[in-house]
Image: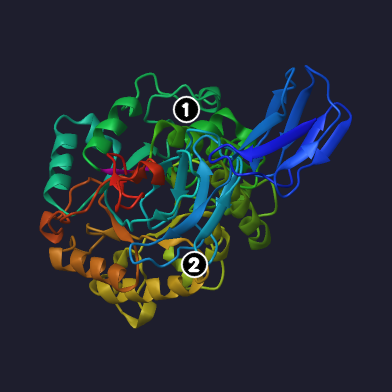
Amino acid sequence: MAIQTTLSSNGAPLAGVTVSSGDQSAVTDAQGATTLMLLTGDEVTGDLAGHDPARDRVAAEGPVSLELRDNVARGTVTDPDGAPIAGVRVFVDGGETMAESDEDGAYQLPGVPEAATLVFKMPGYRLNEVQTATSLAIDVTMEPFAARALYSPAAVFETAGRLDALLALLDRTEANAMVIDVKETDGRLYYATDLESAREVGAIRDTPVFDLAELLPALKERGIYTIARMVSMKDNTSAAARPELAVRNSATGEPWRDNIGGAWLDPSAPGVAEYLASIAGDLADKGFDEVQLDYIRFFSDGPYDVADTNLPNTQSFRLPAIQRVLRVVSSRLDMTKTFLSADVFPISFIVPDDQGIGQRPEVIMPYVDYFSPMVYPSHYGPGVFGFPVPNDHPYEVIDETLKRMNVEKEGLPVVIRPWIQDFGYGAFAPYTADQVRAEFQAASDNGAKGWMIWNARAIFTESALGPPVEGEASGPTTSTGPEAAAPGTSPSAVPSASP
């Protein structure tokens, strides 16, 4: 019996389709045709790579027709100037397969179902979501994005009027993002969740500080990019509940404590990476635009002679341990709409070793989207970069630091976005507006995509901040695919409300 195979979208004949029924099989020719010995009622299946399989049953009369749907999304990703962007992650929202654009910006993603949402994800650009239609030939233009963030500790949400005041400041200025504490050194989560791994260690509060189901939509409606700051290794609650995860005191057998009584998780202990990944994944599932790992390092500032870790506490073991934690967390977030960042000490770019904490650019940069050095000039020691008092030279100190970081990131898609200071430290007076602006300038001059301002009390120098950026959209670029675009318009750019 004659069998005809065609492409479902336009009826074009499909060659190379494997047609089978029972023990019989054949391959269609250039006209999409072949024959099999069939009886009425036999089931016939057509299979071709890059297409959904088609099935039909033999009717009493006439040939068998099989229509196969092309399931490979393909196209080119470019910037607004038309230049190709390499390394863009392309995946179906909720799917399990990912592709990356090549040096020409081209991508191919197989296995795309009907009515899917394609996600295009690249640090330094707005998340781009495209609804698929009949054709899966989709070219996308990625819009650059730089987060200019203000630190938002729990006090902002616990004290009446603080959140409203911060939101008003965001409305009045160029700031477009918030870094929100979700887990501090205490280890208990500030947000409402039913995450089982957190419940097991007692990290869920009876009265959460905020409910992300209410908070995040409200912030997104205002066009605010949301970053979840998650203290990682310093964790009193988890260390007490699961001492096998913690740095141990060899003299007492209890969790080791630093000079201010803080307990630390051991990055080399089995289960630590998975616990942190579960929290990061929960934050992504709840809708944060970015998860930021702070204290992503080994313990410090305590009685080292009684500190006991799962593996020898040497650099050759510390670096792979930190690398594995980042790899596990990164894998959990890779195919979500949430970016990953990490806070790091700049010292790792000034000295050749890890300073005993496992932070080196080569083990962190490959696994994060945003690399966030804490380039506070007040924290640089006398003589660094030739300055007796680095605090007095904010532009020069940050400029030199970021120059070194740009060398380390060469060839990687990671984007540098530093923490900068708007505070006084020790004997140093609070920074002036001019000093804060000097930090902005140093970041900009070295290609950093935005900045984050640290002030532990969340009190910021408004005069240092510019006005809102005219014409800056707040959300990802969204479209319904080329078939739904009006004639003469781009299929890739309709702003939505979430960053």
Q: Position of residue 116 (x, y in %)?
A: 48, 35
Residue 253 visible, this orientation: no
From the image, give the main secondary structure of the stretch colored magenta. Answer: strand
The residue that disc 1 covers is: 203
Q: Residue furthest front?
A: 61
Q: Is tag 1's residue or tag 2's residue first in the polypeptide sequence?
A: 1
Image side of residue 6 versus residue 429, left or right: right
Circle on res. 463:
none
Image point (30%, 58%), residue name: 451
Q: Which amino acid is tagged 2? A: Ser
The stretch of residues the image draws in magenta is 224-228
- Relative to 482, residue 392 above or below: below
At 26% from the left and 47% from the top, the residue drawn is 474
- Give percent across and percent down for residue 343: 43, 54
Element type where label 1 sits in the image: loop
Quadrant including the N terminus: top right
Q: Nearer the viewer, residue 52 or 175?
A: 52
> Which residue, as the protein is rendered here, is positioned at the far bottom?
386
Residue 128 % position (x, y): 39, 47
Q: From the viewer's perspective, is residue 428 above or below residue 113?
A: below
Question: Residue visible at 17% across and 40% down?
Answer: 167
Secondary structure at badge 2 equals: helix
Q: Residue visible at 49% across and 67% down?
A: 348
Residue 384: image quadrant is: bottom left
